[in-house]
Image (cartoon, rainbow, N blue to C red):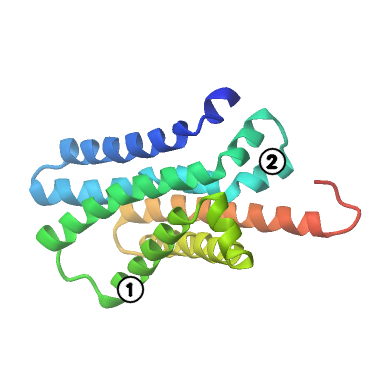
Amino acid sequence: MPTLLDRRSTPLLLGLATGLLAVAAGLLAGGDAAERAGLAARWTARAGLPLFLVAFLASTLVRRWPGPVTRALLRRRRQWGLGFALAHTIHLVALGINVTIYAPGRTWQSLIGGGLAYALLYLMAFTSTDGWQRRLGKWWAGLHTVGIYYLWFIFTASYAGRAFGDDPGKRVVGILFGSIMIAALALRLWSRRRRAVPGTSG
């Protein structure tokens, strides 16, 4: 298992596979073209979430539970981020088709918020090399820190909106995935706090 996770291609292949499988599932499950487009857009967003969480929590997991698997995840954290970027690019295409053809009328706030998330995502993907890290210096860490927390915020805000909505099905999804996002942040911050406190392990 660690050997498979340590391959550069694994996160990218997973990002491509999960994105395409989510599109296929949406197309098969929908009753008409509008429903199929909506499901493809919705499910591709969820498909990329596990890859994002690996990138978000890689250093946290290796601090709390050091071992071959968590070390392999940390070594390939950039690739997990790129895999997420690939999966979310598929989501962007599916979402673009949905909102331009079948569900127009998005608010400018959602377009700006989502557009900024994609801008940061692609900046992070483009600069995910040692060369760019050397060129940007301290700005590289700032870009990637701000970017990953902003992506966390967009995911969490989206699910929180569903959690407090009127649709019971969407409410369950919102509570489930919103809770996962909040738990991921709590684990990351708790692990960093323990590392910063003298006398604590990890």
The x, y position of residue 120, in whole percent, is 43, 64
Give the amino acid at mark 2.
Val
- Return the residue at label 2: 62
Circle 2 — which element? Answer: helix
Which residue is found at the position 53% from the left and 46% from the top? 78
Asked whether, in this view, residue 29 is left or right of residue 153, the answer is left
Q: Quadrant of residue 189?
A: bottom right
Q: Quadrant of residue 196?
A: bottom right
Circle 1 — which element? Answer: helix
Q: Residues within 10 Å of mark 1 (few under 14, many from 20)?
A: few
- Return the residue at label 1: 112
Question: Which quarter of the rendered picture does the N terminus lie within?
Answer: top right
Residues at marks 2 and 1, CA–CA distance in whole angstroms: 35 Å
Asked whether, in this view, residue 95 is left or right of residue 85, the answer is left
Which residue is found at the position 36% from the left and 46% from the top? 86
Q: Quadrant of residue 63?
A: top right
Which residue is found at the position 33% from the left and 34% from the top? 17
Asked whether, in this view, residue 74 is left or right of residue 18, the answer is right
The x, y position of residue 106, in whole percent, is 22, 70
Which residue is found at the position 38% from the left and 51% from the top? 173
Question: In the image, is residue 201 above or below residue 134?
Answer: above
Give the amino acid at mark 1.
Ile
Question: In the image, is residue 54 above or below residue 102?
Answer: above
The x, y position of residue 91, in whole percent, is 29, 50
Furthest residue in direction right, as rendered: 199
Residue 132 in view of the camera: yes
